[in-house]
Image (tube, rainbow, N blue to C red):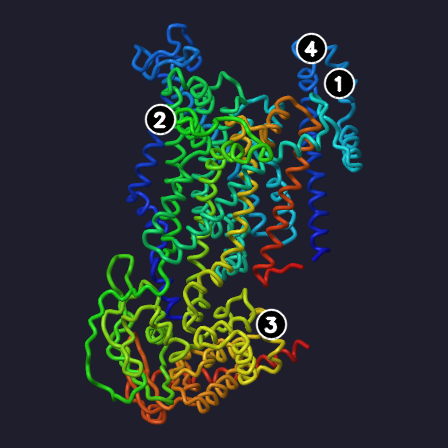
Amino acid sequence: MVQYILRRLAIGVILAALVTFLTYWLLSFSSDGVAANILGPAATADSIQALKKDMGLDRPFIIQYFDWLGGVVRGDFGVSFFTSEAVVGAVVARLGVTLSIVLTALVISVVVAVALGVLAASRAGAIDRVTQSASLLGHLLPNLLIAIVLVVVLSINLRLLPATGFTPFSESPSKWAASITIPVIVLVINGIANIAAQVRGTMIGELQKDYVRTLRTRGVPTWSIVYRHALRNAAAPALVVLSLEFISMFGGALIIEQVFALPGFGSFAFNSSLQGDIPVIMGITVFSVMLVVSVNLVTDLINGWLNPKARIY
Amino acid sequence: MSTEAAIIATEAPATPVRRSAYRRLIRDPQAIITASFLLLVIALGILAPLITQHGPNESSLDAVNAKIGTPGYLLGGDQSGQDIFARLLYAINTSVISGLIGTSVAIVIGLFFGLVGGYFGSRVRTSVEWIFNLIMTFPGILLLIVLMPVTKGDYRATMLIFGVLLAPGVYRIVRNLTIGVKNELYVDAARVSGLSTLRVLGRHVMPVVRGPVIISAAFLTGSAINVQAGLAFLGLGSAEVPSFGAMISSGFLNLYVDPLQFVWPALLLGLMSACLVLLGNSLRDSLEGVRPKASKIGAPAQAAVTTTDQTGGQAADLLQVQNLEISYPTPSGEKKPVLKGVSLDLRAGETLGLVGESGSGKTQTAFAILGVLPPESIITNGSIKLDGRELIGLREGELRKLRGRSIAYVPQEPMSNLDASFTVGAQLVEGIRSATSLSRHDARERALELMEHVGITDPQRTFNLYPHQISGGMAQRILIAGAVASGPKLLIADEPTTALDVTIQAEILDLLRDLQKEMGMAILLVTHNFGVVADICDRMAVMQQGRIVESGDVVEVFSNPQHPYTRELLEAILDEDSVREDAPVVRVSAAKELA
């Protein structure tokens, strides 16, 4: 098993190298813009060239890349062009905000969606119609619109919650909760829609299988058939959706953080990209790839635990 | 799944023909309304220069925050004095073009590589797979932003890249469908008969892939439109390009002055993406047929039970089935009868063989007695009595007390009837504990005892194995052990040997016979095999098309069949046997020649 994890992580590292190579290559086309951004409105063609030379941006792209990669191997991700902040520290500092929102939203989505999906599949009737309508509604409404409408109603009109900004949990748990409430609601609405539809579909399929009938003929109680047997077998596909949902929430946080002026990973990435802060963009890219790789790895490991046939290790 | 149930399942969505799918679509009001709305919106966008009096970027100081209905400004002006109505219509074009670019790129790439990856060998597939996994790890929207300097903020270039990012979704769908079709016999036949790869792909694979791709196109367009709006909202791209995102953003900033400035673009964007999702759902319903419905477990679906309490059969009978009629609803709303008045009875300790071809209603009869008919089934008439107690109309909770203790079940296909996620031991223990009041420890002891009893050589080891780790014969022994665990009076065995090797079939029948002798239970044996009937049954009943056409003592029926159908079946069985005797000889000699 350890060997399996190591192999997967090694593949992840190779993947990260490839993705960063491509990103670096694409970024290399805009080095003039970067220099101009740093110099500000007073930039001239000469001063841009001088700065590029100074920063080493005039070297061939491949040399720049391996220079950067060499640093990364030594654990040095460089410093921001604009703030001189160390990249690793800067990314970690912003991560807390995004993870507060994404993980809270994910946990709520999973609990509600699994309950809805399982009840819808096993009870049918009214709860099934509620679940189907809820997931349809969640698909119908664009995230951006939900976010803005909630800000307008809850923050601006009713003044119940802060419209923008973030309070760290360590500072004040209640203010922390208030500051993430609307962003979490926005992510939860979509999350529930996706996960509940998946859980419902898989559970319906599972409950029609032969072993369910056989368990019934043994006198096994319905709750055990639904929650111990069918749910366990339905968990694997649901987990895949869950991991995709986590990654897409992480990406979706970008727009939400921008709407709510939250100093998170997404808005950090956004601003750095606009400025062309190459070391920060590269750090963010490495982090994103490793995040995707680890989420997929954890998903596969849990799947193996759930489904003895899928045990790869 | 049992044969009968399978036949019903395949008959239910009976007309998955393409033409009827199209007809269903144009009769679906949801599809018509959403599609017409989208067409109307697109038309408005195209006709924008004719409808509006102002260009999208034309601004006038007089029109700054103009109210609704100001002459020439239907929806008023925004904070820079531009005509909101005009901008809205031009923004439609931006949205539509974004959707078209993103979706077509995703579909062209996904379709091409999906066909290639699905149709060609595993080496090609592995490398294609690798590339798409790589694309999926690109941090989506982030990449679009990072590449702003490359795209120069042009939303069309951005959507081109976004299309590539959407491609893995299409690729997965197409690849999986293609792999499925490729293994179909008719595609094999087409290839063997020398059709070129392109012809095979066009003729056989494309029709299967087309529907799901069309469905996904609706959803992809929605997501491309929303991403474009999101990026424009963030302020990416040229301010010259009118778009919903930019309008929402400026309306948002101007919220205190005039909230309506925000409402118009938000409403139109919301309606467009809602229509795309609803249209996608309609397409899915009509192209892929009815999706499986949820149903309550053990819900008594029997709508119209008019139990005719006939007196007949003997009071001493353990099981009395009288005049049982079961129907299934068809898509057209009629009821299709599968059992048309089945009556049979079974004395304690007796073995009754229920014989008939696939679809004759044997398994439906067995399921009705067990109370595990599919929820959509309707018992229209009849009575099932066990020990004089009526079973029809009992609730799941009441039936549960009978199952395992009084009636037990041995299924046909051993593997699919075990839960793959639990060890066989755990499944036995759960069944035993459900039907008895044994403690966990005692139930475990009992399970090990039973496993040894049904001929499993190393019960301790097998106890901890998962179903996929044991053979079919062993799985069937486990299922028999589970069925007889609490000494039932009636064992219903549905083709218990059909899925097994011939040598193991005999062993399983011996096991059933021994268990019956020991426990004195009655067995209702559903089978299509007269050999099995002759081997183990006391009496037999022959079923044809939902009716019992002949029943009686096994020896009598075999020696003097009354019904023409019984005679036909007996002759067919003899034919089958003679073929089976010949076949191996031929194969052996062929193998020798090859060697």
Please tell me the numbered disc located at residue B43. Answer: 2
Point out residue A233 in the picture as x, y percentages from the top left corner.
51, 60
Write down the residue under mark 3. B464
* Quarter of the image where one finds residue B94: top left
- Label 1 crowd bin: few (<14), some (14–19), many (20+), radius 10 Å: some
Q: Residue A277 location in percent, x, y? A: 68, 24
Disc 2 + disc 3, Cβ < 8 Å: no
Q: CA distance from mark 2 to mark 3?
A: 66 Å
Judge left or right: residue A273 versus residue B97: right
Residues under labels 1 and 4: Cα distance? 12 Å
Q: Which element is circle 2 on?
A: helix
Tell me residue A45's x, y (percent): 71, 11
The kind of residue tagged 2 is Ala
Q: Amino acid at mark 4?
A: Ala
Query: Circle 1 is placed at which residue position?
Result: A52
Of all chains, the one bearing label 1 is A
Q: Is residue B400 visible to the viewer in this orientation of the structure? A: yes
Identified by mark 1, the residue type is Lys
Name above or below for residue B528 compared with residue B127.
below
Q: Chain of mark 2?
A: B
- The residue labelled by disc 4 is A43
